[in-house]
């Protein structure tokens, strides 16, 4: 199906401003599972014979939730550190045997798959997952964490972001359907953190860079999203010094909003993407804006870019690079950056210790949402830029709570658009999967486990 312009009319939020529930979402509580489309969800039922794994998973789960501020409804039993608190986030496990079998067989991947299959639910999924995210490093006892390398699945070599694999990895997410993304994104088609009106304060640096933390001042609504996305783009263009006559390289096109706004400033822009769906719609949007003479968009791996550019900008693309290639990423940018130029990167980050612990782990997000993806830490980006290029981190804006609000708005729009999503050919399991992805991500930012940052790099001035 060809791309369509996004519908600017948002679906209404649930009444009273309360959290969306499964009933609000019209998500199927027990979705029909097509084994051809979801083979591992169907297979997990056949693997329920793994009683030992399921029993161990149940014991670990029960011990973990005793320490957490949640209510877990397990048949007639109520578990959790907040079992008597009616306001605590609730997890409703409808099919315990299937849930513990899935978690026992594949850990956190099974946890997500079990939600997709309807084994468990929550009337406030983001709040529940926020509690888990805040304690993710301690959910499994330390002695068992030492066995992580023997139990946790490893990233498939076929999904490493080599020049051979990367386009397929990108296509599996970004080429799902432009119309799917238009069902929950705003009219700018920006698929990255927005920057709402906020209050700023100084933050701790990792390499003597100027660091600012920004938090939203209000709970934004849908009408706030477009100006917030434009504010985000304008800030990163300002940070890179983009203006009249600037030669700009954008790594990761998205659907063209940054290129359009940069060209509107009088810059000439070359943007590269590996998504054919994004390429088609971004070129259309650039042409509709009357800027085709200033913007060139190519289906090209960033490593193959040639030329010289005064500014290099990249918004939430480094997450798709893979930790094995971060050095090559910075070497490429250093090679094409003109003397005196600046680099501005918007990146989702995670704590450095968790990055080190999980860098070889195959996750639910990898399997179902972003194959080959991996989040860096600020320390890793600083270290790779310093050891693989002449670039140095000079300033940084942290605005993770803005991403939590962005994801909340996307999810409200998505679950209000399920009829449209179904018309595109996506099924009940996909509905639950995508809702889980948006709420899971929101929880990571709400808990502070994840952050999003705009980072500015410049070449080190030689004495």
Image: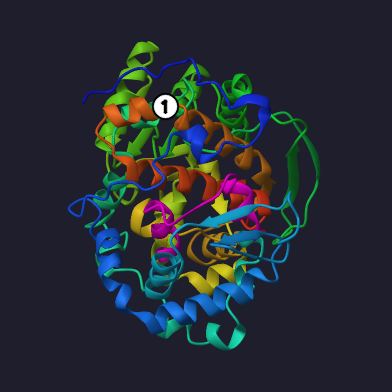
Magenta stretch, overall SS: helix
Residue 309 to residue 229: above or below: below
> Which segment did they paint magenta?
109-131
Q: Quadrant of residue 289?
A: top left
Name the quadrant of the C terminus. Answer: bottom right
Q: Is 299 displayed left or right of 401 in the figure?
A: left
Q: Nearer the viewer, residue 186 or 69?
A: 69
Residue 123 visible from this viewpoint = yes
Query: Which quarter shows the N terminus?
Result: top left
Picture quadrant where residue 255 is located: top left
x and y percentages locating residue 270 in the rendered image:
37, 32
254 with respect to 39 (left or right): right
Residue located farthest toward the front when viewing the structure as drawn: 76
Q: Residue at x 64, y 49 (%)?
A: 127
Query: Alpha-carbon neighbours of circle 1 within 10 Å: few (<14), some, or many (≥20)?
Result: some
Which residue is labeled 1 in the image?
417
Q: Give coordinates of residue 116: x percent, y percent.
A: 39, 52
Residue 442 lies, in percent from the top left, at 58, 46
User: Is 115 part of what is drawn in magenta?
Assistant: yes
Rendering coords of residue 106 (x, y %)? 39, 71
Closer to the camera, 109 or 370?
A: 109
| Secondary element type, mark 1 | loop
Going by the picture, which residue comes out furthest to the left? 36
């Amino acid at each position: 199906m060809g791309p369509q312009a996004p519908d600017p009319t948002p679906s209404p939020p649930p009444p009273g401003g309360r959290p969306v529930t499964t009933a609000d979402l019209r998500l199927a509580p027990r979705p029909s599972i097509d084994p051809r489309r979801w083979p591992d969800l169907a297979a997990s039922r056949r693997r329920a014979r793994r009683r030992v794994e399921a029993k161990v998973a149940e014991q670990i789960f029960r011990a973990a939730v005793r320490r957490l501020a949640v209510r877990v409804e397990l048949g007639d039993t109520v578990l959790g550190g907040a079992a008597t608190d009616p306001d605590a986030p609730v997890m409703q496990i409808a099919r315990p045997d299937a849930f513990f079998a899935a978690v026992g067989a594949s850990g956190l991947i099974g946890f997500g798959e079990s939600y997709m299959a309807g084994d468990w639910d929550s009337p406030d999924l983001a709040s529940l997952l926020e509690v888990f995210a805040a304690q993710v490093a301690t959910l499994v006892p330390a002695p068992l964490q030492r066995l992580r390398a023997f139990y946790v699945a490893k990233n498939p070599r076929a999904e490493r972001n080599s020049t051979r694999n990367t386009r397929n990895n990108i296509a599996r997410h970004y080429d799902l359907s432009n119309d799917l993304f238009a069902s929950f994104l705003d009219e700018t088609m920006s698929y990255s953190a927005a920057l709402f009106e906020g209050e700023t304060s100084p933050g701790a640096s990792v390499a003597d860079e100027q660091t600012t933390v920004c938090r939203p001042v209000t709970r934004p609504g849908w009408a706030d999203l477009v100006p917030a996305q434009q504010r985000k783009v304008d800030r990163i263009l300002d940070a890179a010094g983009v203006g009249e006559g600037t030669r700009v390289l954008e790594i990761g096109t998205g659907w063209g909003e940054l290129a359009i706004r940069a060209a509107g400033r009088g810059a000439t822009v070359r943007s590269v993407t590996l998504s054919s769906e994004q390429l088609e719609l971004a070129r259309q949007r650039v042409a509709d804006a009357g800027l085709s003479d200033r913007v060139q968009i190519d289906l090209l791996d960033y490593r193959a870019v040639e030329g010289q550019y005064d500014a290099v900008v990249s918004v939430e693309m480094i997450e798709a690079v893979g930790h094995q290639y971060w050095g090559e990423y910075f070497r490429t940018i250093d090679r094409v950056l003109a003397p005196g130029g600046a680099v501005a990167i918007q990146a989702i980050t995670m704590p450095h210790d968790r990055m080190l612990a999980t860098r070889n782990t195959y996750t639910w997000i990898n399997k179902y949402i972003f194959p080959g993806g991996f989040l860096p830490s600020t320390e890793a980006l600083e270290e790779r830029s310093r050891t693989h290029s002449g670039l140095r981190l000079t300033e940084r804006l942290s605005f993770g709570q803005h991403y939590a609000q962005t994801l909340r708005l996307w999810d409200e729009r998505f679950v209000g658009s399920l009829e449209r999503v179904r018309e595109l050919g996506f099924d009940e399991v996909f509905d639950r999967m995508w809702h889980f992805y948006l709420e899971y991500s929101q929880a990571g930012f709400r808990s502070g486990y994840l952050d999003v940052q705009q980072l500015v790099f410049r070449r080190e001035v030689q004495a």
